[in-house]
Amino acid sequence: MAINLQKGQTIDLRKNDKGESFDLSQVTIGLGWDVKQKESGFFGKLFGGAKEEEFDLDVIAFLLDSNGKVANLGRDLVFSNGNKVGLHGGDVVFFNSMTYPSGSGTSSTLFPEGTPKYSMEQKIKQLLNNGELIVHTGDNLTGEGDGDDEQIIIKLESLPAKIEKIVFLVSIYQGIQKNQQFGKVENAFIRACDKNNKEIAKYTLSNSPELENKHSLIFGETYRHNDGWKFRAIGEPLYTDNFVEVLKKYLN
């Protein structure tokens, strides 16, 4: 049975206190969220009730070395249409650099909007079979649907020794501009499942005044401990909606 974590709680990912063991050769970090419904007035209630606002939350993973820093910032990548993105193929896994190490995923979006689920699953499987150690499964632009809204799949036991810790950040895209903040988000969670899809642990964010006017959240982290890995629930809200601003604290 999975452990429901409290803020600040740390667990061993290999084995729980009931003696149940987990296969960490491939771990899925899943994140999900719902948006609080807002009232839409008398006519809104008459013709369909409350209206749900669409939030675009992005999941980013910072891969840290023994000094707690992101050592490799990757490179700029220029596409055929002239668009340029930075941080590609480095120690930051996000919507424009969705694999580690950089290999098959050379486009800005591995899974364009509208890609059939079957095609996405086949592509993810192919990337993992081809040696990718981390795969970000795509950008959910609305948070609609049940279960995980975004996932990062990690071959924990195969990561190079230089990677000591992975920090998971969630930010609301253009949250400040759109006046969207975590105070309007509910049922947000982060969970870890092993290779066999057994849920190891789950941390659900509780409603709190500290989330008001915050547009990013350091949700949790996994780190090496002895010959295994641990996970810690953090839940630290931040004002910025730009993950690059958060990245700066992990640079030399």
Image (cartoon, rainbow, N blue to C red):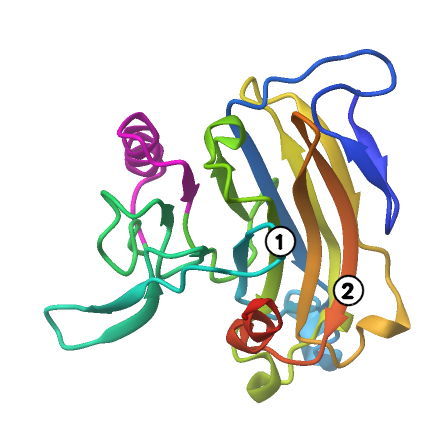
Q: Is residue 229 above or below residue 49?
A: above
Q: Secondary structure at mark 1?
A: strand
What amino acid is labelled 1 in the image?
Val
Q: Secondary structure at mark 2?
A: strand
Marked residue nearer the N-terminal end (1 or 2): 1
Q: Which residue occupies 84% across, 36% down?
A: 4
Query: Few, some or many C-alpha atoms within 10 Å of disc 1 (few <14, some 14-19, many ≥20)?
Result: many
Q: Which residue is mark 2?
A: 236
At which x and y percent is residue 3? 82, 30
Q: Which residue occupies 80% across, 71% down?
A: 211
Which residue is at the front of the view, 87 or 174? 87
At which x and y percent is residue 24? 58, 23
Magenta residues span 114-137
User: Is residue 20 something that shows in the picture?
Assistant: yes
What amino acid is labelled 2 in the image?
Glu
Which residue is at the front of the view, 252 or 135? 252
Q: Quadrant of the C terminus?
A: bottom right
At which x and y percent is residue 86? 33, 71
Mark pair 1, 2: CA separation: 12 Å
Question: What number is the disc on residue 82?
Answer: none
Number of callouts in the render?
2
Q: Nearer the viewer, mark 1 or mark 2?
A: 1
Quick check: 206 left or right of 147? right
Q: Is residue 197 above or below residue 94?
A: above
Q: Which residue is mark 1?
A: 167
Q: Quadrant of residue 247?
A: bottom right
Residue furthest toward the left? Answer: 80
Q: Which residue occupies 80% across, 54% down?
A: 205
Q: Quadrant of residue 1?
A: top right
Q: Quadrant of residue 133?
A: top left
169 within the magenta span: no
At which x and y percent is residue 166? 59, 48
